Image: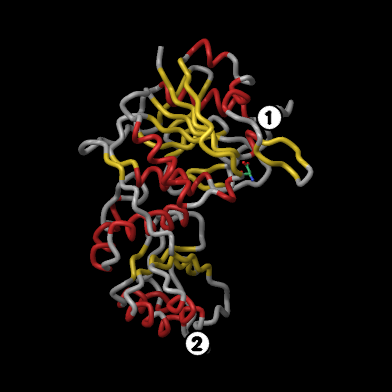
Amino acid sequence: MKKFLLLTTGGTIASQAGENGLTPQMDAAGLLHYVQQLKDLYQIETEALLNLDSSNIQPEEWQMIARRIFVDLAYYDGFIITHGTDTMAYTASMLAYMLQNIDKPVILTGSQIPIDSHLTDARVNLYCAFAAADSGRAGVYVVFNRKIICATRAVKVRTMGFDAFESVNMPDVGEVRSDGILWHSEPSKNNGEPMLYDNLESNIFLLKLIPGTRPEIFDHIVNMKYSGVVIEAFGAGGLHHIRRDLLEKLKLLEQNQIVVVACSQCLYEHCDFSVYEVGQKLLTLTNVIPAYDMTTESCVTKLMWALGQSHDVKKVKNIFSRCYCDEIDLKYL
Ligand code: ASP
């Protein structure tokens, strides 16, 4: 019988109505009570690691989760993490970077309605999460609404619907069907021993541009000593430079050795800052890294992770020039 570790961290799946709205209250035993059949199929050990709404999950919690898994990597056949859906894509992506070359499945799941509700999606999500872990396919995945999604490609796209996650710029890795799991791709090959990279630089900023964003925002970013910035630019890659010259002001970040990752506000397809005049100038700055087809969640977490290894702009660029866990299409590297 396979042995899995179920780590609970809170989220809607474990929530119950309190005086101030839904709050996570249930522990792992409470969750397992609703999915009794799992106990006949697997040996499940549990740990209530956290009990938070995922809005409160931050880099310190990512480190805690990654370390907890890594320490017992050899001991279990896989790990299932229940987590709030709101920031699950960030956690999944970060775990994929932190847990390099792991040889076990790490599956994140949660639900849109608490597990004790009669309409809940929690039970099917948990059953599917264990089925994905049972497959033995190594790596970090989000399992939701019967879909198996690569951790660095998951994005939460719905607030209420059960199909809350999409795999962006990459097909789902697989799906749970009536005849078992149908895989849509081959697992990627490990190239070495499992490693834990748990240094993170959380001091980074995400700037989503709006028409008219004032360039002085970059003065504040420098003054606040941010180590890195992700800029969600317009379309295929554009920033305004008439009246409010963002491109000129970005030189300040270059002078201060602050790394900039440039991605698009569009959810789908890749950005290419060389296409338009409003983007090209950005590429002349030595501190800028184009994100191509990476999701914003994956850019933010990769930047924190890369800066956790080095603050040297060249080294960070070097880290970004590699694909670690399917976060970027290799054709862009
Ligand atoms: N607010 C909840 C959370 O992210 C939402 C959910 O779990 O669906 O913890």
Q: Secondary structure at mark 2?
A: loop
Q: Quadrant of the N terminus?
A: top left
- Above or below residue 247? Residue 167 is above
Q: How many neighbours does mark 2 have within 10 angstroms: few (below 14), some (14-19), or many (20 or more)? A: few
* In front: label 2 or label 1: 1
Does the beta carbon at disc 1 come under 8 Å from ligand 1? no
| Residue to which mark 2 is pinned | 242
**Residue 214 vs residue 66: left or right?**
right
- Above or below residue 317? Residue 330 is above
Does the beta carbon at disc 2 come under 8 Å from ligand 1? no
Ligand 1 is found in which quarter of the picture?
A: top right
Q: Which mark is residue 234?
A: none
x and y percent of residue 293 in the render? 40, 55
Residue at the (43%, 29%) spot, across then down: 79
x and y percent of residue 181 in the render? 45, 23
Q: Quadrant of the C terminus?
A: bottom left
Residue at the (55%, 26%) spot, across then down: 126
* 178 vs 86, nearest the viewer: 86
What amino acid type should be assigned to the residue bearing mark 1?
Thr
Q: How many neighbours does mark 1 have within 10 angstroms: few (below 14), some (14-19), or many (20 or more)? A: some
Q: Is residue 94 visible?
A: yes
Find residue 53 and report its image quarter. top right
Find residue 132 and report its image quarter. top left
x and y percent of residue 100 in the render? 30, 41
| Residue to which mark 1 is pinned | 120
Furthest residue in direction left, as rendered: 192
Q: Is residue 152 visible?
A: no
**Residue 269 vs residue 30: left or right?**
left
Q: Secondary structure at mark 1?
A: loop
Precedes in sequence: disc 2 or disc 1: 1
- Above or below residue 193? Residue 61 is below
x and y percent of residue 266 in the render? 51, 60
